[in-house]
Image (spheres, rainbow, N blue to C red):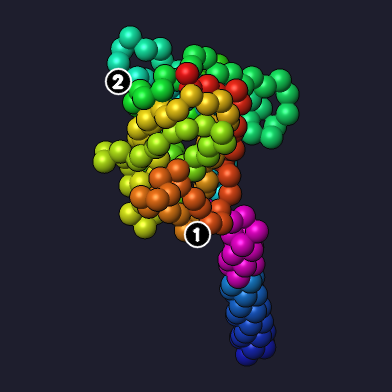
Amino acid sequence: MNTNNQNFKLMITNFLNFNFMKTTKFLLSAIVCLTLVTTFTSCSDDDDNPPPVNPTELFTNVTLTFTPSNSTNATVVMEDIQPNGQGGGGATSNTVSGAFVSGETYSLSLAATDASDPNDVDDLLNDDVIPEADEHFFVYGLNGLNFTMTRDANDIVGLDNNKIGVNTTWVAGAASTGNLSITLVHEATAVDDSANNNLGSATGGEEDFNITFTGVTIN
């Protein structure tokens, strides 16, 4: 009888040990599978959610202020306001205040802002354009106007050592009336500010804005 009891206890022990080992293996397998699934899911999420792209700047207000070397002459101000940004539609304003004087030299001061939120106006020229000079270039255009324009020695230098056109000097020639345009090119593949092309030219890239002021006068 004792022998039978011992055999029965041994059978029970072996059965419990066997099931314990099976249970342990099952739990280990489950943990490994769960780890693999979590890792795979994490990788998939990373692939499906690439790093965010910086949003395109919204230029709502662009102002050109031409200050004469002779303080007795008037300052000329050109201002373009597009509340929804370039091409955004809605009411716009494009004005020219004052007239240029033949023979006078003018220093141009630029301002470009995002004023879509009046309580939080963003100075895009100083916060975005100038710090990223290699990605920006101003191209100017004249139609019917007699001007000589140069990019100043202290102008901001950008792509391929070209001056981007923030600091410029303008000399008014003979009396005339016409248009003056300013274009900000973003990420051009090539730009040129050479002596015979001071107004500038750019190849490739996209236009952050392209503005034309009409009815500009040199007296």
The numbered dot on residue 67 is none
Q: Secondary structure at mark 1?
A: loop
The numbered dot on residue 189 is 1
User: Mark 2 belongs to which amino acid?
Assistant: Ser
Q: Nearer the viewer, residue 36 or 13?
A: 36
- Answer left or right for 128 relative to 45: left
Residue mark closest to the camera, 2 vs 1: 2
Q: Which residue is rendered at x = 56% and y = 53% of the image? A: 205
Q: Is residue 178 magenta?
A: no
User: Which residue is situated farthest in the top direction here?
Assistant: 72
- Answer left or right for 8 relative to 72: right
Earlier-in-chain disc, 2 versus 1:
2
User: Mark 1 belongs to which amino acid?
Assistant: Thr
User: Marks 2 and 1, how far apart in space?
Assistant: 36 Å
Q: Where residue 157 appears, x then y in whole percent?
A: 33, 47
Q: Which residue is mark 2?
A: 69
Q: Secondary structure at mark 2?
A: loop
